[in-house]
C-alpha cells in the first residue's frame, strides 16, 4: 500500500522578525505554496495531494452497433379499411363538387317558362309573374318560390312545377273552378266554392253557370257558402243545366234548371251522395204524360220526384 506521506522541504526556522518565538508562526496549508520572508532569503514549501484511492469513472453506456429493427407488416384488414375509407371519401368529395356545380352553374339558368292548364288566366300572365326567376339556376328554384310569385293571381289555386334542364321550367296551373255567377248591378262575377271572385262578365249566358241573385252580401255569408258548396259538388254536366240557386236558410237550398224544373237540395250534408242521385234522376227517361217538375234529394237514400 503506497504511503500517504507528502514530501516537504523546510529549512531550519529562523527568527526573522520580532515575535517569532512566541508560537504564532503560520503553518503552510496542504497543496499550497507559501512564501515566508526571512532575513537571509525566502522559504519555499511545496506539497502535492495524492488521492487515496482512484475514483472509478462511471461506465459509459455502450450503444449496440449494427442493431437491426424488425418491421411487422400491417394487417390486411386494416389496409383494406383504409382503402375503402379513402375511396368513399373521394366519391363524397366528387359528388359534393358535382352538386355544387349543378346548383350554381349558369348553364342551368332559367330561360323558358312553359305554362299549361290555364283558362281564366293566360300563359303570358303566368310568365310575366315568374319573370323575377329568369336567370336563376333551376336547382335553386323551389315550388314555394313559384307559388309566392303567382299569389296575386287569384284564379290560380295551386301549381305543379317541374325543372327540365338545361333551361326550362314547366308550370302546370290548377285554377279555381267557378261554380256560380253573382249578380252585381249590371255585371256578373264568377265565384268559386269559397266565394273567391275569379272574373267578371256582362253576359251570363257566356259562362253557363247558375246565378246567385244578390250575391254574398244580400243573402249572407253563411247562406252563400252553403249554396256555393252545393254547386261545387255537382258534376259539370249537371252544373251546366242550372239556371240559378237560392237558399232561404242553411237547410233549404234550392236549385233551378234552365227548363224550369226545381231541385230541392236541403242542407249541405251528404252533398256527394245527393249529386250522384240527382245525376241518375236527370238521366232517367222522361214521361210526357207525367213530366217531372221537382226533384227532391234532401233525403238522398229516399229521393222523391213529383
Image (cartoon, rainbow, N blue to C red):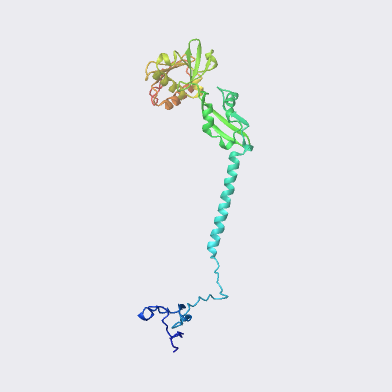
The residue nearer to you, when weighing 21 against 241, is 21
User: Toward which corner of the image does residue 10 lie, by quadrant?
Assistant: bottom left
Q: Position of residue 99 (x, y in %)?
A: 58, 43
Query: Seen from this angle, which residue lies furthest bottom?
Result: 1
On the picture, is 252 further left or further right than 236? left
Q: Position of residue 60 (x, y in %)?
A: 50, 76
Q: Position of residue 291 (x, y in %)?
A: 46, 16
Quadrant assignment for the C terminus: top left
The residue nearer to you, when weighing 34 against 261, is 34
Q: Residue at x 60, y 42 (%)?
A: 101
The residue nearer to you, when weighing 210 against 86, is 86
Q: Is residue 160 above or below residue 193?
A: below
Query: Seen from this angle, which residue lies furthest left?
Result: 22
Q: Is residue 86 above or below residue 28?
A: above
Residue 200 seen anywhere in this rendered image of the structure: yes
Q: Is residue 218 above or below residue 84?
A: above
Q: Residue at x 58, y 51 (%)?
A: 91
Q: Position of residue 164 (x, y in %)?
A: 61, 36
User: Toward which corner of the image does residue 276 lie, by quadrant?
Assistant: top left
Q: Residue at x 51, y 12 (%)?
A: 187
Residue 32 seen anywhere in this rendered image of the structure: no
Quadrant assignment for the N terminus: bottom left
Amino acid at each position: 500500500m503506497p504511503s500517504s506521506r507528502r514530501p516537504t522541504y523546510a529549512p531550519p526556522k529562523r527568527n526573522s522578525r520580532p515575535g517569532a518565538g512566541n508560537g504564532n508562526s503560520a503553518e503552510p496549508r496542504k497543496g499550497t505554496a507559501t512564501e515566508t520572508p526571512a532575513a537571509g532569503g525566502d522559504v519555499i514549501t511545496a506539497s502535492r495531494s495524492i488521492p487515496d484511492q482512484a475514483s472509478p469513472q462511471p461506465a459509459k453506456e455502450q450503444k449496440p452497433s449494427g442493431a437491426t429493427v424488425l418491421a411487422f407488416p400491417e394487417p390486411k384488414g386494416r389496409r383494406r379499411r383504409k382503402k375503402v375509407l379513402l375511396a368513399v371519401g373521394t366519391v363524397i368529395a366528387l359528388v359534393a363538387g358535382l352538386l355544387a356545380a349543378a346548383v350554381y352553374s349558369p348553364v342551368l339558368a332559367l330561360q323558358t317558362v312553359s305554362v299549361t292548364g290555364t283558362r281564366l288566366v293566360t300563359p303570358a300572365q303566368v310568365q310575366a309573374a315568374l319573370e323575377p326567376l329568369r336567370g336563376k339556376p333551376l336547382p335553386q328554384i323551389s315550388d314555394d318560390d313559384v307559388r309566392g310569385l303567382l299569389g296575386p293571381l287569384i284564379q290560380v289555386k295551386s301549381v305543379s312545377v317541374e325543372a327540365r334542364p338545361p333551361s326550362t321550367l314547366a308550370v302546370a296551373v290548377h285554377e279555381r273552378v267557378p261554380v256560380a255567377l253573382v249578380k252585381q248591378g249590371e255585371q256578373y262575377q264568377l265565384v268559386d266554392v269559397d266565394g273567391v271572385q275569379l272574373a267578371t262578365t256582362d253576359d251570363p249566358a257566356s259562362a253557363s253557370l247558375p246565378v246567385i241573385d244578390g250575391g254574398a252580401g244580400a243573402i249572407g255569408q253563411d247562406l252563400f257558402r252553403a249554396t256555393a258548396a252545393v254547386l261545387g259538388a255537382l258534376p259539370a254536366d249537371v252544373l251546366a243545366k242550372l239556371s240559378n240557386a237560392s237558399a232561404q236558410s242553411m237547410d233549404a237550398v234550392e236549385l233551378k234548371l234552365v227548363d224550369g224544373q226545381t231541385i230541392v237540395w236541403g242542407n249541405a250534408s251528404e252533398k256527394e251522395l245527393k249529386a250522384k242521385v240527382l245525376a241518375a234522376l236527370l238521366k232517367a227517361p222522361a214521361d210526357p204524360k207525367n213530366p217531372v217538375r221537382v226533384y227532391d234529394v234532401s233525403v238522398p237514400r229516399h229521393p222523391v220526384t213529383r
